[in-house]
Image: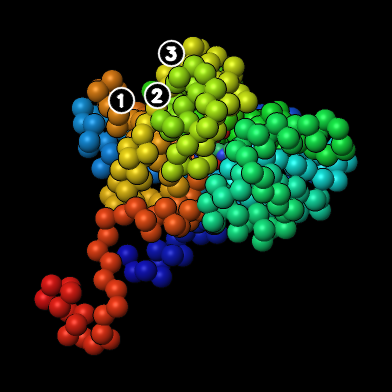
Amino acid sequence: MPLLRSLRNLGKRPIHQDWPGLIEAYRAWLPVSSSTPVISLREGGTPLIPAPSIAAQIGRGVRVFLKYDGLNPTGSFKDRGMTMAISKAKEAGSEAVICASTGNTSAAAAAYARRGGMRAFVLIPDGYVAQGKLAQALLYGAEVIAIKGNFDRALAIVQDVANQYPITLVNSVNPYRLQGQKTAAFEVVDALGDAPDWLCIPVGNAGNITAYWMGFGEYRQAGRSRKLPRMMGFQAAGSAPLVLGQTVEQPDTIATAIRIGNPVNKDNALRVEAESNGGFMAVTDSEIIAAYKLLGNHEGVFCEPASAASVAGLLKRKDEVPSNATVVCVLTGNGLKDPSTAIENNDARFHTGLDADTATVAKVMGF
Ligand code: F0G
């Protein structure tokens, strides 16, 4: 058919369906009313990307998908929770918000709070926040307070401050955060037509695993899925309190986003593990980096190191995946958040300092 005629045959129906943001998309499932001022950057609606190279490493008919939440407006899944938390803070008349963060929460809090006309205070562990995240918090106009202490200490301080002063806490102890984040599970079921058999997810403060489980449960209850997934949580080996069963005083990992020794949602995480017949496991930094490189090199997906923990964990447990199962790995943040880790950890051939002539270029290309 000639191109012009086929274009005319498409009629007036738009090809691109605009995404209204997760509060509008899932309004009936969220604690908002017509008087809630919706502060949105059109977050959510992220793709579920097939991962054939990872699936091939498992074999036996297993299908693997990546829930790429690094494509949210500030580059991480935190936007899902923040659109809710900030909209509800605005509804309640709050003029300022505060959070502790390993970086992504601070970027999201800053963007949404400023968009809503509020001040944003963020406490971060000095020297342990990836460069892109710090750049975001500063550019979005947060008031950044870097402390000589880790995330767990920062969280204790912001909880104190929020108890004593008129300011809204937007860490995942804020219940609206998890309400927003549960929509990622809705999207996974909407895309697959059912829940996956396994959900693999990085775990730090354990808010996201709690939120996903809530979302899967609500959809199952409403008859939108026939099953519930096993929730497989992965922590970095140097910061694995849920695997060790105790607080880690000095958490350490290359995956700074999940460098957390005392998860505030610990009890929820243990409940999710029990209810879903799931499991927590530690992955080493070198396993995380191997998965990070595999995702980039073979799937064309650039995530941050913490996110790659979900794939590292799946590969570690691959023999336990049932044949023909559907697995979703959550990629929580965008690789651009942490450029220095990518520059220091890759298998690329990077030829530098060469003379600017065709012969030299052709030679290094192998011609
Ligand atoms: N992945 C990324 C990229 C994160 O930024 C975080 C948490 C997690 C996974 C873990 O999620 O805490 O719900 O279990 N980042 C927080 C922050 C702590 O401050 O940005 P969780």
- Residue nearest the viewer, comparing 299 with 95: 95
Q: Estimate the x, y position of residue 31 in percent, counting from the top left.
A: 74, 30
- Residue that numbered label 1 is attached to: 317
Residue 49 can be seen, yes or no: yes
Relative horizontal placement of residue 301, taking residue 118 as reference (left or right): left
Relative horizontal placement of residue 144, taking residue 363 as reference (left or right): right
Relative horizontal placement of residue 20, taking residue 33 as reference (left or right): left
Looking at the rendered structure, the kind of residue marked 2 is: Met
Looking at the rendered structure, the kind of residue marked 1 is: Arg
Question: What residue is at 63 percent from the left and 26 percent from the top?
Answer: 264
Residue 75 can be seen, yes or no: no
Mark 2 and 1 residues: CB-CB less than 8 Å, in contact? Answer: yes
Looking at the rendered structure, the kind of residue marked 3 is: Asn
Mark 3 and 2 residues: CB-CB less than 8 Å, in contact? Answer: no
Which is closer to the viewer, label 1 or label 3?
A: 1
Disc ID at residue 1: none
- Mark 2 vs mark 1, CA separation in Å: 9 Å
Is the C-beta of the residue carrying label 3 under 8 Å from the nearest atom of ligand 1? no
Disc ID at residue 277: 3
Q: Estimate the x, y position of residue 9 in percent, counting from the top left.
A: 45, 60
- Residue that numbered label 2 is attached to: 281
Question: What residue is at 70 percent from the left and 40 percent from the top?
Answer: 99
